[in-house]
Every structure is written in C-alpha cells, then in structure tokens.
C-alpha cells in the first residue's frame, strides 16, 4: 500500500496538494514554463506536465481534488437497488443457471447502475454489505462418497507433497555436487 496508515491521504494533505495544483494552474494561465513552475512549487517536472495536460483538457476544475480514493463508489441507495436485482435471481438477468458469480454481479451493476467496477471492487462491495460466497444448500445427487474418500486418502497426499527434494543440495549451477 502506498500510504501505510490506512491507505490514502488525510483531508488536510489532500487540500494542500490541491492548492499546489491550483497555483500551477494559475501559472499555466500566465504562460509560465513547466520547468520554472516545477522549481518554484518544489515538485517534479513530470507532475507539472501531467497537471498541464489535465488543465488543457478540463481547465482549473480538472486540477481540483477528486476526494478520498477509498470512498465507496456505490451509494446505499444504489446498493439497495442492487440487492433487489440480486434477489430476482440470475435467470431474471439472462444467465443460464442459478449461480451468482462476481463477474455476473459486475454485469448487473454495469447494466442496472451504469457503473464500471472491477471484479475485486465488486467483491469488496459485497463483503462490506455482509454478502458472502454461495454454498450449495445440498450435495449433488451424483456425488460418490466412496470415490471422494478414496481420492482424499490416496491422491491428495501425493498432490500435496512437496516437489522439492528433501536431500541437501547446492545452489551452484556449475558445480551441483560441491560442498
């Protein structure tokens, strides 16, 4: 994480950085060179170049702070709509079976709320609101308990076993048997 105290800047620090960007915007308006602006504001030239590009595209408003990075992108009202949609079931949204996957929830959010969220963000959103992964209510009729137990006893120990040799070796590529 970039900022170890909980991820993100404090409101004061965000305001401080915004003030510097706005000062840079005033200098852009005055026609000042990038290197001079960077030196006077004690920031990198790359930052000033990035700010200048944003300023050209969106004016002074583009230099304002977008707010805290970790604020939820889905409001409580929007989540209530999402819960209602999820309650209808996957087949009501055109999915072939009755499983909610993160990708399917992501699709419903994109269609219904018109928001584009990553799968990881969808997972955090659902977890924050007390949702968890789906577990089947009952076992499959086709399940062979004897075969499952046999696999656990015979196959799983071989799969789980370490692939590294247990005898001491050498880290040298040129002389593998040297002490």
Image: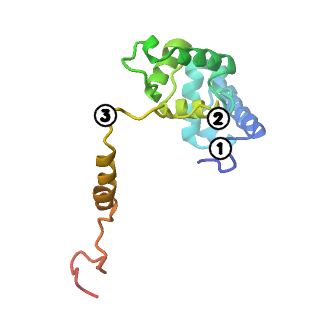
Front in this rendered view, residue 136 or 163: 136
What is the distance, in whole Å, between disc 3 and disc 2 at their CAs? 45 Å
Q: Who's the residue at 71% across and 31% down the image?
A: 23
Sequence-earlier tag: 3 or 2: 2
* 170 or 172, nearer to the observer: 170
Q: Which of marks 1 and 3 is nearer the N terminus?
A: 1
**Above-or-below relation of 169 to 88:** below
Q: Do the residues labelled 2 and 1 touch (CB within 8 Å)?
A: yes
Q: Percent x, y for residue 165?
A: 28, 73
Q: What element carries label 1?
A: loop
- Circle nearer the viewer, 1 or 3: 3
Secondary structure of residue under mark 2: loop
Quarter of the view holding residue 166: bottom left
Q: In which quarter of the image is the C terminus?
A: bottom left
Disc 1 from disc 3: Cα separation: 47 Å
Estimate how packed mark 3 is, as few (under 14), some (14 to 19) or many (20 or more) residues with alpha carbons within 10 Å. Answer: few
Name the residue that disc number 3 marks: 142
Name the disc covering residue 70, or none. Answer: 2
Along the line of sight, which residue is nearer the eye, 42 or 161? 161
Q: Where is residue 97 in the image (x, y as percent from the top left)?
A: 38, 20
- At label 2, counting other C-alpha atoms closer than 10 Å, the crowd grade (few under 14, some 14-19, many 20 or more) is few
Q: Which residue is drawn at 30% across and 68% down?
A: 164
**Label 3 residue SS:** loop
Q: Nearer the viewer, mark 3 or mark 2?
A: 3
Residue at x-position 52% and y-position 26%? 117
Residue labelled with disc 1 = 7
């Amino acid at each position: 994480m970039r900022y170890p105290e909980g991820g993100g800047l404090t409101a004061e620090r965000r305001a401080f950085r915004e003030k510097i960007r706005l000062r840079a915007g005033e200098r852009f308006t005055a026609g000042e060179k990038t290197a001079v602006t960077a030196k006077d504001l004690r920031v990198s030239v790359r930052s000033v170049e990035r700010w200048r590009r944003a300023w050209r595209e969106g004016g002074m408003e583009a230099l304002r702070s977008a707010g805290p990075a970790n604020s939820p992108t889905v409001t409580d009202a929007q989540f209530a709509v999402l819960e209602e949609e999820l309650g209808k079931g996957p087949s009501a949204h055109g999915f072939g079976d009755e499983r909610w996957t993160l990708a399917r929830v992501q699709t419903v959010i994109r269609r219904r709320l018109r928001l584009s969220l990553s799968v990881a963000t969808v997972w955090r959103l659902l977890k924050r609101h007390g949702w968890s992964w789906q577990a089947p209510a009952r076992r499959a009729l086709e399940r062979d308990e004897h075969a499952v137990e046999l696999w656990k006893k015979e196959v799983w120990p071989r799969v789980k076993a370490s692939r590294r040799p247990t005898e001491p070796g050498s880290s040298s590529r040129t002389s593998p048997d040297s002490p």
